[in-house]
Amino acid sequence: MDGIRNICDRPKNTNIKWSLPAVCFVWQLSMIILFGVFVRYNEESDTHWVDYRKENNITSDIENDYYFRYPSFQDVHVMIFVGFGFLMTFLKRYSFGAVGFNFLVAAFGIQWALLMQGWFHSLDYTDGKIKIGIENLINADFCVAGCLIAYGAVLGKVSPVQLLVMTLFGVTLFAVEEYIILNVLHAKDAGGSMVIHTFGAYYGLSISWVLYRPNLDKSKHLNGSVYHSDVFAMIGTLFLWMFWPSFNSAIADHGDGQHRAAINTYLALASTVLTTVAMSSLFEKTGKLDMVHIQNSTLAGGVAVGTAAEFMLSPYGSLIVGFFCGIISTLGYIYFSPFLEEKLKIQDTCGIHNLHAMPGVIGGIVGAISAAAATNTVYGDLGLENTFDFTGPFAKRVPTIQGGYQAAGLCVALCFGIGGGIFVGLVLKLPIWGDPADENCFDDEIYWEVRQTCIKATQLKIHSDS
Amino acid sequence: MDGIRNICDRPKNTNIKWSLPAVCFVWQLSMIILFGVFVRYNEESDTHWVDYRKENNITSDIENDYYFRYPSFQDVHVMIFVGFGFLMTFLKRYSFGAVGFNFLVAAFGIQWALLMQGWFHSLDYTDGKIKIGIENLINADFCVAGCLIAYGAVLGKVSPVQLLVMTLFGVTLFAVEEYIILNVLHAKDAGGSMVIHTFGAYYGLSISWVLYRPNLDKSKHLNGSVYHSDVFAMIGTLFLWMFWPSFNSAIADHGDGQHRAAINTYLALASTVLTTVAMSSLFEKTGKLDMVHIQNSTLAGGVAVGTAAEFMLSPYGSLIVGFFCGIISTLGYIYFSPFLEEKLKIQDTCGIHNLHAMPGVIGGIVGAISAAAATNTVYGDLGLENTFDFTGPFAKRVPTIQGGYQAAGLCVALCFGIGGGIFVGLVLKLPIWGDPADENCFDDEIYWEVRQTCIKATQLKIHSDS
Amino acid sequence: MDGIRNICDRPKNTNIKWSLPAVCFVWQLSMIILFGVFVRYNEESDTHWVDYRKENNITSDIENDYYFRYPSFQDVHVMIFVGFGFLMTFLKRYSFGAVGFNFLVAAFGIQWALLMQGWFHSLDYTDGKIKIGIENLINADFCVAGCLIAYGAVLGKVSPVQLLVMTLFGVTLFAVEEYIILNVLHAKDAGGSMVIHTFGAYYGLSISWVLYRPNLDKSKHLNGSVYHSDVFAMIGTLFLWMFWPSFNSAIADHGDGQHRAAINTYLALASTVLTTVAMSSLFEKTGKLDMVHIQNSTLAGGVAVGTAAEFMLSPYGSLIVGFFCGIISTLGYIYFSPFLEEKLKIQDTCGIHNLHAMPGVIGGIVGAISAAAATNTVYGDLGLENTFDFTGPFAKRVPTIQGGYQAAGLCVALCFGIGGGIFVGLVLKLPIWGDPADENCFDDEIYWEVRQTCIKATQLKIHSDS
């Protein structure tokens, strides 16, 4: 690793006047061409829906999948753009980069995800076209979530061009691992504990490991929050927290599946808040609370209940999952993040290891256990079949076996995350992407026109005072 | 009162390193145990829904209550966590406490509310279990709203442990008064003018009265806003304002009930904005507007139309209610709040008396009058029966009688609010909860790690300048 | 023009202590009276719905239009109040005015719009009453959007009384042009590219032209952003961006119409983000991004796909529209806005010409072309009839003719915008409305009690430093 690092250590040029426009234009044009060749409306968003309704004896327009999923879709959409975007605004001088690059990355990622996921999941073999509807839009948002989680690890240390490259590869890897986990292994993962969170977090952490900056403390004075930036970050936290029930239920089964996923997530998240507060208070002097924990660890329960949200986890089961995740995630911020940085050389700006990686793995394990423990008594015969889709080629699978496949799915997510992250990290080491020097990390001035000098002047003044 | 006050006047110790974690852990563990014993999915969120559908000839999954109520639920959820949370961020140095403690209190409250309301409303007597679904989640959010309203009165003057105690008792009292009002008296209160707002506001005001701090002006310099904190507060105001139609319609009857409640609330709120602006301008020198009024009084119409939102209040009726509430609420901020503080010794940080108490009482009265005035001509025979649930033991009730019971409901809410508040206030007087000294009120530094000193330094500097 | 300008140039009196309250009270009272005379619930929000259901063999409450449209309605509502409101908070000292006056104007406008649009579209000729339901609420929000777009052009330069006058006339003009375009010409415009954006933008630009202030650079120091105000503005941008699919689909046809409109808008907006970033980077030194472009031009694709969102524009068609709009809108900010101000004497504070006017016109043209190009092969016979409502008196219309009427609709929107704007601008020139002097523009102190002096002191200090 060190060898490659040295090769890439040259004076940094952060001028992206040609690379960023070039990447944006070329990729967007490619999207248009690929969409032109491949993407069409599905039968529920096409004007032929009126004929489809008649053929299939659908009595009312309200049974269009749009009405089952649109409210959840919009909530997920808010989580992606406002939730992730504002959660990362906590840094004192990187709010533009947080919310702006999040915006850019997500806008590209959803298009690429529609294609990649489309080829794997929505290809109509009769005409070779991808047929999209509301569920594809949700899945594209989900796919991008993985990349935005990864962004959290490298926040402030990479250029927008690097982020776009990271997203291009991230979405591609995501679509493949998702296909293996959901279709080949036939594991269930409604809220994406494995597919989204475990993959995304280890993908980002591996990239951050490859891109390790030994002299990052040169920009240490900017690697922290100010009062108002912490309040902005709470906008992100709360929209993620509130809409997480929609995230975990968005692509769950119609009817009881979506209903149950929402309840389980609601409860797990509530429980997490209390244990996060408890741990935060317990480990700070005089019991004060730390905004970092409140902003992040309160969300761990939603991650960890992702896989099992659809299952008969039962309300108290959800509370238990949330309970432990609040504790583990907060301890992660207190003990594990410093360890990661000092010993493992992983600089994790937002602490995604504590918010997504550990809770994601827990979520995968909880999912495997609760799948393996499923019984006809609890689920009912039809309920069991519906919940785990024991139909077609999987008609003979039983819950215990399903549990094994769930665990296998978790391993796949881990492998893709770590392996893919190392590969992409090496690509991003190339000294052509315009990443900032160590002393310019966490500073919006590098990639943004920051017009006013008011606040900067104040800050400088005060820094010299203090 | 004064005697007890003196007993409790000792030097304050705000160290909550043990009390806060202890309360969080013990209560959360209790929740897990109680949920384990009592709480299960209802037939619409259970995997047996597929069987239930068949038995009850339900033709489509879309008729699961989830699809009737989930969009409103998420809107209510946003009101609770972002609406109430950000509305209270207006103080210059208490934004963490506003949004953070709001988060903690609500996360605990919804769990306890699911139990308390469950025992009263959703207990399945065949197996002694509480069966929960989407409507329970909404009701839990509603229940917590009462406690968050009360928080507004004591904002900045209590410790998080006190808030949790306040919520424990508040939710308990709420569930009992709600049962009496809705089930025993069979009053209607879709938007909770009585059950939520009147109760919550008088609960908070009574607590604040018992906890009166004669020397609160020691922290007067922090009891106000700065420019950006007022903008943050507008996030809260607007999300409350926009989603209030969802609040008042969330648990209304399917179909026309929800539809009408949304329309009435939309109109009442629009009307309130204009009269609030008018009054604010009229009473300030040179007609300037006051952010306090815009942030708060604009919401009064939503409170006041809560009970009658489901009724045939008619569009102009809603406008009239909003019209007067904007006037009364703004006048409350101008004249009544100072009077409350000086004469009645009630320190009401957010002015909940003007935003929730008075409009809540008005809402109860409007509800009683419009119920009493209901006729078969306007409602239709079936419509009247459906709207007021004149079925079962109440099949012979007529509108005029219903009006009387509505009025009785308002009295119950008032009694529970005031009585409960005084009792809980006395509990909170005990010198064990870690509340701040008079000179440390409205200051996040007491309960939060506030890392940067930048803005503080600036403020101090400027305070000495001016 | 200059003659009238001179007549009106007297020392400015910004005291609105009587005019603002008078306008608010009188107009609100008028609303109450007019609603009392004219507005009633429609059959889906009336208690007689239960009878209506039976008569029309509607099997379930879920087929009430409320459930088709409420989620979109709430998203549109958020766009109007938070989206438009916060988008305009970017100015360093006009955030109160941006979000507060936006609130006032919209709250009045939706009431007046319910009446105006009601008379044209929802009048029940049997009893002379306007019957309102959820679709009317959405349309009222849409109507107000036109006026809020216009507000963007005059932001910081007008008094709240002027804004209310502007809204009174704006809503009236909107209702008439909407009637001509949608009913007389029978053009389709689900997302309002023509009806809302083109009209609103040219209305505002014409007003701004008439109100031209040659000495506006006296308040130049306030006509810009600070770091945190730019982050606040991103809240507005993102909520507009995320919920735009709801905007364009809110009143589209049930089923595939809404579904398709959401997909098209989602794609167009994603595409716009990439080309906006590309152009912004390409035209700034060292490739830095400009927040003004990110905040505004990223939304242009949503505007431009408004008319055709419902049509079979196809996914790649949407991407193409978004692609070009991002480019054109960003170029508009770089080249066209200075030209407008210097040559055409149009001062456009928010750059609505780039965000709404040009994309709106493009949207109208795209709509006309895609309507003219519609074929039975692509749409299906029934699909074509449903999408373009070729029923009743329009049963014999064919797509090519429809394209012509669409183009005619665009011209009507332009004429009403420009003509109406000039007329209303002249009305607003009267020296009775309390508008600010040139040196007091963009300053909240004129119309708001701004309590704290902290930040002001800092700013002044720093201004003298720099």
Image (cartoon, coloured by chain):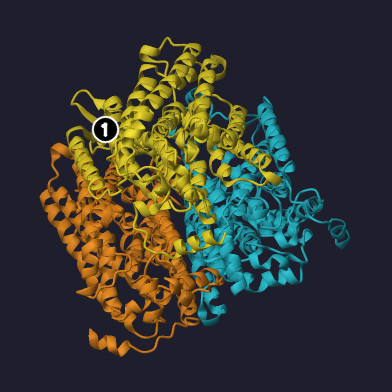
Chain colours: A orange, B yellow, C cyan
**Residue B24 locus on image (x, y percent):** 24, 44
Instruction: Please rate how many residues cluster around mark 1, counting C-alpha atoms within 10 Å: few if below 14, some from 14 to 19, many from 20.
Output: many
**Residue A23 locus on image (x, y percent):** 45, 77
Residue furthest top in the image = B396
Q: Is residue C185 left or right of residue A374?
A: right
| The one of B342 and B283 positioned closer to us in this rendering | B342
| Residue B311 seen from this side | yes
Residue bearing the label numbered 1: B115
Is C461 above or below relative to B262? below
Identify the element where label 1 is drawn: helix
Q: Residue at x 63, y 55 (%)?
A: C444
Is A30 above or below relative to A350? below
Q: Residue at x 44, y 38 (%)?
A: B214
| The one of B382 and B286 positioned closer to us in this rendering | B286
Q: In which image quadrant can residue C331 be found?
A: bottom right
Q: Is residue C45 left or right of residue A165?
A: right
Q: Is residue B53 left or right of residue C439?
A: left
Q: Chain of mark 1?
A: B
**Residue A299 locus on image (x, y percent):** 30, 53
Amino acid type, callout 1 = Leu
Q: Quadrant of the C terminus of chain C?
A: bottom right
Q: Residue at x 49, y 51 (%)?
A: B221
Is A377 above or below relative to A452? above
**Residue B60 locus on image (x, y percent):** 35, 36
| The one of A299 and C273 positioned closer to us in this rendering | A299
| Residue A133 seen from this side | no
| The one of A149 and A171 positioned closer to us in this rendering | A149
